[in-house]
Amino acid sequence: MEHNCHGLRVPFKRIRNDCRTRRQNSYSAQALTSRIVVPGDLISPLDVNKKSGPSTYCCSGNILSSAFGYVKEESHTDGSKTFSVVPLKTSGIVPYTGSIVLAKVSSITRRFVRCDIVAIGEVCLAGPFKGLIRREDIRATQRDQAEPGCCFRPGDIVRARVINLLGPGAYTNTGSFMSSTSPQTLSTLLTTQAISCSVAATNDANISGSSSVCLLSTAEPDLGVVLGLGRSPDNSFLELLGSTSGSPLVPVGWTEMLCPHTLTRYPRKVARVPDELITQLICAQIE
Protein backbone atom coordinates (compact mmCIF):
# COMPACT_ATOMS: atom_id res chain seq x y z
CA MET A 1 0.00 0.00 0.00
CA GLU A 2 1.09 3.57 -0.77
CA HIS A 3 -0.03 6.97 0.58
CA ASN A 4 -0.94 9.90 -1.65
CA CYS A 5 -0.31 13.56 -0.89
CA HIS A 6 -3.48 13.73 1.24
CA GLY A 7 -2.44 10.83 3.43
CA LEU A 8 -4.91 8.39 1.87
CA ARG A 9 -3.82 4.87 1.15
CA VAL A 10 -3.81 3.86 -2.53
CA PRO A 11 -3.24 0.29 -3.76
CA PHE A 12 0.23 -0.17 -5.29
CA LYS A 13 -1.20 -2.17 -8.22
CA ARG A 14 -3.38 0.77 -9.21
CA ILE A 15 -0.41 3.14 -9.18
CA ARG A 16 1.58 0.77 -11.37
CA ASN A 17 -1.25 0.45 -13.88
CA ASP A 18 -1.71 4.23 -14.01
CA CYS A 19 1.99 4.75 -14.69
CA ARG A 20 1.95 2.12 -17.44
CA THR A 21 -1.05 3.76 -19.09
CA ARG A 22 0.60 7.18 -19.00
CA ARG A 23 3.76 5.78 -20.56
CA GLN A 24 1.79 4.14 -23.36
CA ASN A 25 -0.04 7.38 -24.08
CA SER A 26 3.13 9.46 -24.00
CA TYR A 27 5.43 7.20 -26.03
CA SER A 28 4.79 5.24 -29.18
CA ALA A 29 6.09 1.75 -29.82
CA GLN A 30 9.28 1.76 -31.87
CA ALA A 31 10.71 -1.22 -33.72
CA LEU A 32 13.97 -1.29 -35.65
CA THR A 33 13.54 -3.92 -38.34
CA SER A 34 16.30 -5.99 -39.91
CA ARG A 35 15.39 -4.69 -43.36
CA ILE A 36 18.13 -2.68 -45.05
CA VAL A 37 17.29 -0.19 -47.79
CA VAL A 38 19.23 2.07 -50.13
CA PRO A 39 18.12 5.43 -51.56
CA GLY A 40 15.10 4.96 -53.80
CA ASP A 41 13.91 1.68 -52.24
CA LEU A 42 10.19 1.30 -51.55
CA ILE A 43 9.43 1.20 -47.83
CA SER A 44 5.62 1.21 -47.78
CA PRO A 45 2.61 2.56 -49.67
CA LEU A 46 1.45 5.93 -48.38
CA ASP A 47 -2.02 6.27 -46.81
CA VAL A 48 -3.77 8.08 -43.96
CA ASN A 49 -2.33 5.67 -41.37
CA LYS A 50 1.22 5.62 -42.73
CA LYS A 51 3.48 8.64 -42.47
CA SER A 52 6.94 9.52 -43.73
CA GLY A 53 9.65 10.04 -41.13
CA PRO A 54 13.32 11.06 -41.12
CA SER A 55 15.50 9.91 -44.06
CA THR A 56 12.44 9.13 -46.19
CA TYR A 57 10.38 10.96 -48.78
CA CYS A 58 7.03 10.54 -50.55
CA CYS A 59 6.70 10.02 -54.28
CA SER A 60 3.78 8.72 -56.39
CA GLY A 61 1.86 7.56 -53.34
CA ASN A 62 4.77 5.63 -51.84
CA ILE A 63 7.20 6.15 -48.98
CA LEU A 64 10.75 5.80 -50.32
CA SER A 65 14.13 5.76 -48.64
CA SER A 66 16.58 8.63 -49.02
CA ALA A 67 19.39 7.00 -47.01
CA PHE A 68 21.28 3.73 -46.65
CA GLY A 69 20.28 2.01 -43.42
CA TYR A 70 17.67 0.09 -41.44
CA VAL A 71 13.91 0.63 -41.68
CA LYS A 72 12.32 1.85 -38.45
CA GLU A 73 8.59 1.46 -37.78
CA GLU A 74 7.01 3.65 -35.12
CA SER A 75 3.47 2.67 -34.06
CA HIS A 76 1.25 5.30 -32.44
CA THR A 77 -1.71 4.88 -30.11
CA ASP A 78 -4.14 6.14 -32.75
CA GLY A 79 -3.25 3.20 -35.00
CA SER A 80 -1.01 5.12 -37.37
CA LYS A 81 2.60 4.28 -38.23
CA THR A 82 5.62 6.40 -39.06
CA PHE A 83 8.33 4.91 -41.24
CA SER A 84 11.88 6.23 -41.07
CA VAL A 85 15.39 5.05 -41.90
CA VAL A 86 18.22 4.85 -39.40
CA PRO A 87 21.41 5.44 -41.42
CA LEU A 88 24.28 3.02 -40.97
CA LYS A 89 27.50 4.28 -39.44
CA THR A 90 29.30 3.65 -42.73
CA SER A 91 29.14 6.21 -45.48
CA GLY A 92 26.70 4.07 -47.46
CA ILE A 93 27.58 5.61 -50.81
CA VAL A 94 25.64 3.99 -53.62
CA PRO A 95 25.52 4.62 -57.38
CA TYR A 96 22.80 7.01 -58.52
CA THR A 97 21.49 8.08 -61.90
CA GLY A 98 23.85 10.54 -63.55
CA SER A 99 26.88 9.74 -61.40
CA ILE A 100 30.32 9.05 -62.88
CA VAL A 101 31.76 5.75 -61.68
CA LEU A 102 34.88 3.65 -62.11
CA ALA A 103 34.30 -0.02 -62.83
CA LYS A 104 36.40 -3.11 -63.39
CA VAL A 105 35.34 -5.28 -66.33
CA SER A 106 34.60 -8.83 -65.20
CA SER A 107 33.19 -10.56 -68.30
CA ILE A 108 32.17 -9.82 -71.88
CA THR A 109 29.54 -11.22 -74.23
CA ARG A 110 28.49 -10.22 -77.74
CA ARG A 111 25.68 -8.01 -76.40
CA PHE A 112 26.93 -6.47 -73.17
CA VAL A 113 29.79 -6.03 -70.72
CA ARG A 114 29.54 -7.03 -67.06
CA CYS A 115 31.58 -5.06 -64.58
CA ASP A 116 31.99 -4.27 -60.89
CA ILE A 117 31.56 -0.64 -59.84
CA VAL A 118 34.34 0.09 -57.36
CA ALA A 119 34.30 3.89 -57.06
CA ILE A 120 31.77 6.71 -57.35
CA GLY A 121 33.34 10.02 -58.26
CA GLU A 122 36.46 10.12 -56.11
CA VAL A 123 35.20 7.81 -53.35
CA CYS A 124 36.27 4.15 -53.37
CA LEU A 125 33.64 1.66 -52.25
CA ALA A 126 34.09 -1.11 -49.69
CA GLY A 127 32.90 -3.63 -52.27
CA PRO A 128 31.62 -3.70 -55.82
CA PHE A 129 28.16 -2.94 -57.17
CA LYS A 130 27.08 -4.73 -60.32
CA GLY A 131 27.18 -2.77 -63.56
CA LEU A 132 26.12 -3.53 -67.12
CA ILE A 133 27.19 -1.83 -70.37
CA ARG A 134 24.99 -2.66 -73.36
CA ARG A 135 26.44 -2.72 -76.86
CA GLU A 136 24.35 0.28 -77.94
CA ASP A 137 25.63 2.32 -74.98
CA ILE A 138 29.35 1.89 -75.72
CA ARG A 139 29.74 4.85 -78.09
CA ALA A 140 27.65 7.69 -79.45
CA THR A 141 28.11 6.98 -83.18
CA GLN A 142 27.48 3.71 -85.06
CA ARG A 143 26.03 2.27 -81.89
CA ASP A 144 24.77 -0.94 -83.48
CA GLN A 145 28.20 -1.74 -84.91
CA ALA A 146 30.08 -1.55 -81.62
CA GLU A 147 31.64 -4.85 -80.57
CA PRO A 148 32.10 -5.22 -76.79
CA GLY A 149 35.07 -7.54 -77.28
CA CYS A 150 36.90 -4.91 -79.35
CA CYS A 151 36.19 -2.08 -76.90
CA PHE A 152 36.83 -3.68 -73.50
CA ARG A 153 38.69 -6.62 -72.01
CA PRO A 154 38.34 -8.29 -68.59
CA GLY A 155 40.39 -6.43 -66.03
CA ASP A 156 40.13 -3.02 -67.68
CA ILE A 157 39.28 0.00 -65.53
CA VAL A 158 36.42 1.89 -67.15
CA ARG A 159 34.98 5.31 -66.43
CA ALA A 160 31.23 5.30 -67.13
CA ARG A 161 28.04 7.16 -66.36
CA VAL A 162 25.06 5.58 -64.60
CA ILE A 163 22.06 6.03 -66.91
CA ASN A 164 19.57 3.83 -65.08
CA LEU A 165 19.19 1.66 -62.00
CA LEU A 166 17.57 -1.69 -62.74
CA GLY A 167 15.98 -2.71 -59.47
CA PRO A 168 13.94 -1.08 -56.69
CA GLY A 169 14.24 2.41 -58.23
CA ALA A 170 16.56 5.14 -59.40
CA TYR A 171 17.82 7.81 -57.07
CA THR A 172 18.82 11.22 -58.36
CA ASN A 173 21.44 13.01 -56.30
CA THR A 174 22.24 16.66 -56.86
CA GLY A 175 25.20 16.75 -54.49
CA SER A 176 28.78 17.05 -55.65
CA PHE A 177 31.96 15.43 -54.42
CA MET A 178 34.83 17.27 -52.86
CA SER A 179 37.38 18.44 -55.39
CA SER A 180 41.11 17.91 -55.08
CA THR A 181 44.25 18.26 -57.14
CA SER A 182 44.01 16.25 -60.36
CA PRO A 183 40.89 14.36 -59.22
CA GLN A 184 40.63 12.09 -62.27
CA THR A 185 44.23 11.00 -62.09
CA LEU A 186 44.22 10.56 -58.32
CA SER A 187 40.99 8.57 -58.21
CA THR A 188 42.06 6.35 -61.10
CA LEU A 189 45.45 5.54 -59.62
CA LEU A 190 44.09 4.92 -56.11
CA THR A 191 41.28 2.73 -57.38
CA THR A 192 43.59 0.75 -59.62
CA GLN A 193 45.96 0.16 -56.74
CA ALA A 194 43.12 -0.98 -54.50
CA ILE A 195 41.73 -3.50 -56.99
CA SER A 196 44.84 -4.47 -58.94
CA CYS A 197 44.51 -8.12 -57.96
CA SER A 198 40.81 -8.68 -57.45
CA VAL A 199 37.68 -7.11 -56.02
CA ALA A 200 36.07 -9.00 -53.17
CA ALA A 201 32.64 -7.95 -52.02
CA THR A 202 32.12 -7.30 -48.33
CA ASN A 203 28.98 -8.14 -46.41
CA ASP A 204 27.78 -4.55 -46.58
CA ALA A 205 28.30 -4.47 -50.32
CA ASN A 206 26.44 -7.72 -50.81
CA ILE A 207 23.47 -6.41 -48.86
CA SER A 208 23.33 -3.03 -50.51
CA GLY A 209 24.32 -3.91 -54.05
CA SER A 210 22.69 -7.27 -54.70
CA SER A 211 19.16 -5.93 -55.23
CA SER A 212 19.93 -3.73 -58.24
CA VAL A 213 22.10 -3.52 -61.34
CA CYS A 214 23.39 -0.22 -62.67
CA LEU A 215 23.02 0.38 -66.38
CA LEU A 216 26.17 2.17 -67.55
CA SER A 217 27.12 4.17 -70.63
CA THR A 218 30.49 5.11 -72.13
CA ALA A 219 29.03 7.08 -75.06
CA GLU A 220 30.93 10.29 -74.21
CA PRO A 221 34.47 11.43 -75.05
CA ASP A 222 35.50 11.44 -71.38
CA LEU A 223 34.14 7.94 -70.77
CA GLY A 224 35.64 4.58 -71.64
CA VAL A 225 38.78 2.67 -70.71
CA VAL A 226 41.10 4.74 -68.53
CA LEU A 227 43.46 1.89 -67.71
CA GLY A 228 43.80 -1.21 -69.87
CA LEU A 229 45.93 -4.29 -69.35
CA GLY A 230 47.84 -5.88 -72.20
CA ARG A 231 47.69 -9.59 -72.87
CA SER A 232 50.73 -11.75 -72.33
CA PRO A 233 52.59 -12.05 -75.69
CA ASP A 234 54.43 -15.22 -74.64
CA ASN A 235 51.38 -17.49 -74.52
CA SER A 236 49.31 -17.86 -77.68
CA PHE A 237 46.54 -19.63 -75.77
CA LEU A 238 46.15 -16.70 -73.39
CA GLU A 239 46.31 -14.39 -76.39
CA LEU A 240 43.43 -16.27 -77.96
CA LEU A 241 41.30 -16.21 -74.82
CA GLY A 242 42.03 -12.57 -74.17
CA SER A 243 43.64 -12.98 -70.78
CA THR A 244 44.52 -9.68 -69.12
CA SER A 245 47.68 -10.59 -67.26
CA GLY A 246 50.03 -8.13 -68.92
CA SER A 247 51.23 -4.59 -68.30
CA PRO A 248 49.18 -1.38 -68.17
CA LEU A 249 48.53 0.09 -71.59
CA VAL A 250 49.02 3.67 -72.73
CA PRO A 251 46.28 5.32 -74.83
CA VAL A 252 47.43 6.37 -78.30
CA GLY A 253 44.06 7.19 -79.85
CA TRP A 254 40.32 6.97 -79.38
CA THR A 255 40.25 3.31 -80.40
CA GLU A 256 43.71 1.96 -79.51
CA MET A 257 46.03 1.48 -76.56
CA LEU A 258 49.73 0.61 -76.71
CA CYS A 259 51.85 -1.71 -74.58
CA PRO A 260 55.10 0.19 -73.79
CA HIS A 261 57.07 -3.08 -73.55
CA THR A 262 56.02 -4.95 -76.69
CA LEU A 263 54.67 -1.98 -78.71
CA THR A 264 51.60 -4.10 -79.39
CA ARG A 265 48.40 -2.19 -80.11
CA TYR A 266 45.11 -3.29 -78.60
CA PRO A 267 41.63 -2.10 -79.58
CA ARG A 268 39.75 -0.23 -76.87
CA LYS A 269 37.05 2.38 -76.44
CA VAL A 270 39.48 4.88 -74.92
CA ALA A 271 38.39 7.62 -72.57
CA ARG A 272 39.87 11.10 -72.70
CA VAL A 273 42.40 10.94 -69.88
CA PRO A 274 44.66 13.72 -68.55
CA ASP A 275 48.26 13.82 -69.71
CA GLU A 276 49.35 13.40 -66.11
CA LEU A 277 47.90 9.89 -66.03
CA ILE A 278 49.74 8.92 -69.23
CA THR A 279 52.98 10.27 -67.77
CA GLN A 280 52.44 8.25 -64.59
CA LEU A 281 51.86 5.07 -66.60
CA ILE A 282 54.96 5.56 -68.75
CA CYS A 283 57.13 6.34 -65.71
CA ALA A 284 55.83 3.23 -63.97
CA GLN A 285 56.84 1.10 -66.96
CA ILE A 286 60.34 2.60 -67.04
CA GLU A 287 60.86 2.00 -63.33
Image (tube, rainbow, N blue to C red):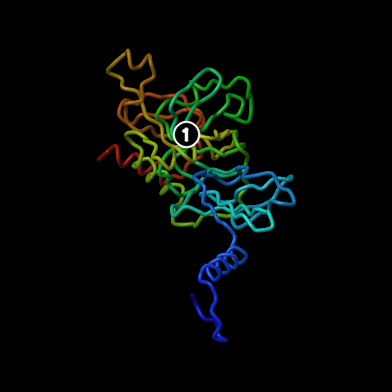
Corner quadrant of residue 202: top left
Which residue is nearer to you in this view: 80 or 139? Answer: 80
Q: Is residue 251 above or below residue 43?
A: above
Which residue is nearer to you in this view: 180 or 44? Answer: 44
Corner quadrant of residue 180: bottom left
Which residue is nearer to you in this view: 33 or 180? Answer: 33
Neighbour tally class for label 1: few under 14, some 14-19, many 20 plus, Cα within 10 Å: many
Amino acid at pointer 1: Val
Q: Quadrant of the C terminus?
A: top left
Q: Position of residue 173 (x, y in %)?
A: 60, 50
104 horizontally vs 41: left or right: left
Considering every residue shown, the one lying at the far left of the view is 287
Q: Position of residue 163 (x, y in %)?
A: 61, 37
Q: Is residue 217 above or below residue 79?
A: above
Q: Position of residue 87 (x, y in %)?
A: 51, 54
Q: Position of residue 285 (x, y in %)?
A: 29, 37
Q: Residue, x 51% and y 44% (percent of image)?
A: 36
Q: Which residue is mark 1?
A: 225
